[in-house]
Image: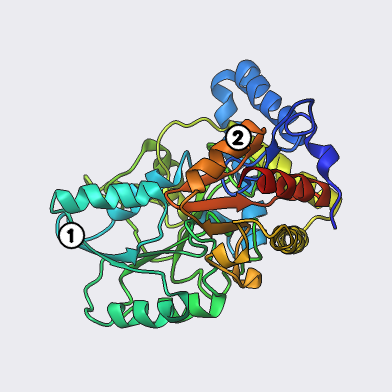
């Protein structure tokens, strides 16, 4: 198993730090991000206006290279950065030919910002939305494809690679089958990879030409806020109506007449002025991993071993919370967090918080996340505390 706890001492290694089992939410930052944050400040303070030359000419290209390598994407320039994934959702929606009556197909297990935004657009009669339930998981792919085939005029297909409210991983082959089943080649397709990027191995080499891919640094990439990114496939969403002035920097040719110019790479989805410090931190984390020879496969294996140990120990306690409560019992098909369905989710969350242990819950679903900074001793402490409070 990995031994990297010493690299997080400023966060969870300090005295009286909480036991953190919410790696699927705010991930602790490794210590290398401290110097990166300082460098972002120093560059802003000393370079002033010229800092953007460094950010656009050095910091962002480095980050693009890191991400492209980890996602098996051939062209780092297909990646653009933004402050959050919601901004990319709005920009992608602005690429549809329709301004109202936009036909969207998705699932009932998308991230809250997407769900809220869709609900509001449905209220305003701007979006016609079909949500395919992800459960039962065994039939999800077939049911989603069947719904896809009911019409050929979808404007947007949006679904997650790992469902946030269960941890269930949509297998790569299933994802490929879904994307191949979209009836109209011009339909915009987006894969939300936030719970997959840097959590499980991801290879976009076979789907990157067809689908957008959105993720960020807040969770498993350990870089915090402000480092979200979008992979933009060639030929899709060429002229977003929602556009910021940073998209001008990627324009490959001058506008003709009154036409607004766009680049052909990911820069066409750039927004406006932003805080680049998150991208500094992202680069620091990626370089740290490279220096340690730490791969996503290594991290995935470490966390899976912790998950298995946790479930085994939990079942041995013979308490009220055990593997039968798991929404995804096949741990090999689960992401970095386990989701337990229980009517006591809120109370367990609160009791653990009183014992300085961080998890979270959504309704009757208790989510427990696993990270590379944890070890078997942390698992034992969590199990002992659960036995006392459940």
| 227 or 53: nearer the viewer | 227
| Residue pointed to by mark 2 | 353
Assign a secondary structure to mark 2: helix
| Residue pointed to by mark 1 | 98
Q: The N terminus lies in which quarter of the figure?
A: bottom right
Residue depicted at x 33% and y 76%: 185
**Residue 191 place in picture, x, y as percent:** 45, 63
Q: Is residue 342 above or below residue 227?
A: below
Q: Which residue lies furthest to the top in this view?
A: 45
Q: How crowded is mark 1: few (under 14 residues within 10 Å), some or many (20 or more)?
A: few
| 63 or 261: nearer the viewer | 63
Q: How crowded is mark 2: few (under 14 residues within 10 Å), some or many (20 or more)?
A: some
**Residue 65 place in picture, x, y as percent:** 65, 53
- Tell me the mark number nearer the camera, choosing from 1 and 2: 2
Residue 184 in which image quadrant: bottom left
**Residue 227 place in picture, x, y as percent:** 55, 41
Q: Is residue 79 above or below residue 173?
A: above
Residue depicted at x 83% and y 46%: 4
């Amino acid at each position: 198993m990995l031994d990297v706890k010493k690299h997080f001492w400023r966060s969870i290694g300090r005295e009286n730090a909480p036991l953190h089992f919410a790696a699927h939410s705010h991930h602790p930052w490794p210590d290398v991000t401290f110097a990166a944050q300082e460098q972002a400040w120093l560059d802003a303070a000393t370079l002033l206006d010229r800092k953007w030359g460094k950010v656009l000419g050095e910091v962002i290209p480095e980050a693009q290279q890191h991400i492209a390598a980890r996602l098996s994407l051939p062209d780092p320039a297909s990646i653009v950065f933004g402050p959050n994934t919601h901004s990319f959702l709005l920009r992608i929606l602005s690429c549809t030919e329709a301004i109202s009556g936009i036909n969207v197909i998705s699932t009932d297990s998308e991230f809250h910002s997407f769900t809220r935004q869709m609900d509001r657009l449905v209220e305003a009669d701007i979006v016609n939305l079909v949500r395919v339930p992800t459960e039962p998981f065994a039939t999800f792919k077939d049911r989603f494809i069947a719904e896809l085939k009911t019409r050929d005029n979808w404007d947007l297909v949006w679904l997650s690679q790992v469902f946030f409210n269960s941890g269930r991983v949509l297998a790569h082959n299933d994802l490929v089958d879904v994307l191949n089943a979209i009836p109209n080649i011009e339909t915009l397709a987006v894969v939300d990879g936030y719970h997959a990027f840097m959590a499980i191995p991801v290879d976009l080499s076979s789907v990157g030409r067809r689908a957008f891919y959105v993720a960020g640094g807040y969770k498993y990439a350990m870089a915090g806020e402000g480092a979200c990114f979008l992979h933009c496939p060639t030929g899709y969403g060429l002229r977003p109506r929602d556009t910021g002035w940073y998209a001008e920097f990627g324009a490959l040719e001058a506008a003709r007449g009154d036409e607004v110019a766009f680049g052909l790479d990911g820069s066409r989805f750039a927004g406006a002025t932003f805080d680049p410090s998150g991208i500094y931190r992202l680069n620091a984390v990626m370089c740290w991993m490279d220096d340690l020879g730490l791969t996503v496969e290594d991290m995935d294996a470490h966390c899976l071993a912790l998950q298995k140990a946790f479930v085994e120990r939990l079942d041995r306690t013979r308490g009220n919370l055990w593997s039968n409560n798991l929404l995804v019992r096949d741990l090999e098909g689960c992401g970095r967090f386990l989701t337990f369905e229980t009517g006591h989710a809120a109370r367990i969350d609160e009791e653990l918080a009183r014992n300085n242990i961080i998890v979270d819950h959504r309704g009757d679903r208790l989510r427990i996340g696993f990270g590379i900074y944890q070890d078997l001793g942390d698992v034992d402490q969590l199990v002992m505390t659960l036995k006392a409070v459940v």
